[in-house]
Structure formats: C-alpha cells, structure tokens
Amino acid sequence: LTYPSVVISAMTLIALMMVVVVIPKVADMYDRMQLEIPLYTAIILNTSVFINQHIWFVLGGAVAFVSVLMILIFKVRPVQVFLKLAISKMPIIRNLFTFYDLARFCRSESLLYTHGVPILSSLDISTSIFFKVQFRRAMVSVKEAVQKGVSIKDAFEQTKVFPPFFVQLVGEKEKRLV
C-alpha cells in the first residue's frame, strides 16, 4: 500500500499547489480583463481565494479530518467492517483483494510449512491473514475437512469459495508435500 499512498500524497500536493499558486494568478488575469466568467469557474476561483485567505484554518481542518478518519478506520471495528464490505463490492478492487489475499495465504503457508509447523496449525494461523471474510469462513471448513482426512485440494474445492486456479495450484503443491 506504499505506492498508492505516495501517488495520493503527490496528487494532494499538486492540487494544493494549483489552488494556492496557479489559480490565484488566473483569477488576477480574469480580474484585470473584467470578463464575465462561467459559474463553475467562479466557484473554483472563489474557493481558491477563500483557501488562500484562510490557509491555516483549512490546513488545520484537513489535518483534523484526516486524524479522525484514521482513528475511525484503524480503531472502530464497525467502520472497518463497513469499509471492507464496501471495498469488496468494487469490481476491480474486489479482484485485486482476492489475488492479494491468496498470495499472502500462499506465502504464509509456505513459510510455516518450511519451518515445520503442522498443516492444521498452519491453516489455523494463516486463516487470520485473509482480508475477505468469505475466505476466513471457508478456511474453517477446510481445516475441519483436512482434520477428517480429506486432501487439502479437495477441502479447498468443497468450499466452492476459492477460485479454480487457486485450487489447482494447491493440488499441484500438494503432490510435492506427500
């Protein structure tokens, strides 16, 4: 998540620079020419003038807003659940989170298996890695099935939650585990 943070920060700085430096110069140009400007242009110019006149209040408000938002996101469980649900409904982001979850799960399982952690314990530990609640719930079924002697591939397949490519990948890896 470092790259998106850098991009959003850069975009915010550029927008702030536009509002503080560029737009006031354009506003001066319009004032000198005494032209009638469209409504949306006037709104943007007046907003820029307001921000320039009250920059410390605007920055203080922005810092307060971001602080409260961060506290809500990281400390309040219902907000976290709502955001996860909202994000998981967005088509492109949903796929990214699916791949991200599966990659983290595979990395975790690989690390735990390499260090000799029993498969049932590693499945238990790796369950907490998932962002998607559906995957976490499905992992309970997977662990129970593996505990009963079902192969890992079949256990993942029975849940019908994990993508086919992932189930196939688990099946290929499982042959090497035996």
Image (spheres, rainbow, N blue to C red):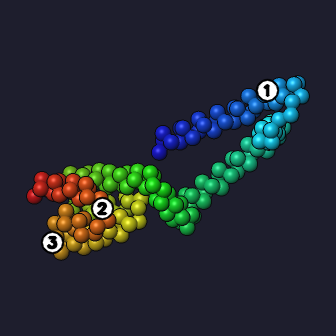
Residue 10: numbered disc: none
What residue lies at 52% left-to-right and 61% top-to-bottom? 86
Local secondary structure at mark 1: helix
Residue 25: numbered disc: 1
- Crowding around mark 1 (Cα neighbors within 10 Å: few <14, some 14 to 19, many 20+) is some
Which label's residue is closer to the chain start, 1 or 3?
1
What residue is shown with label 2?
162
| Amino acid marked by disc 1 | Lys
| Amino acid marked by disc 2 | Phe
**What is the distance, in whole Å, between disc 2 and disc 1 at their CAs?**
55 Å
Front: mark 1 or 3:
1
Which label's residue is closer to the chain start, 2 or 1?
1
Which label's residue is closer to the chain start, 2 or 3?
3
Q: Is residue 47 visible?
A: no
In x, y percent, where is residue 95?
A: 40, 53
Q: From the viewer's perspective, tell me whether residue 46 is left or right of residue 18.
A: right
What residue lies at 15% left-to-right and 72% top-to-bottom? 149
Q: Is residue 103 visible?
A: yes
| Amino acid marked by disc 3 | Gly
Front: mark 2 or 3:
2
In x, y percent, where is residue 50?
A: 82, 40
What residue lies at 16% left-to-right and 70% top-to-bottom? 150
- Crowding around mark 3 (Cα neighbors within 10 Å: few <14, some 14 to 19, many 20+) is few
Local secondary structure at mark 3: loop
What residue is shown with label 3?
149
Above or below 71: residue 13: above
In x, y percent, where is residue 31?
A: 87, 28
Q: From the viewer's perspective, tell me whether residue 13 is left or right of residue 108.
A: right
Task: Judge by depth and name the residue closer to the eye, 154 or 66.
Answer: 154
Q: From the viewer's perspective, tell me whether residue 174 is left or right of residue 98.
A: left
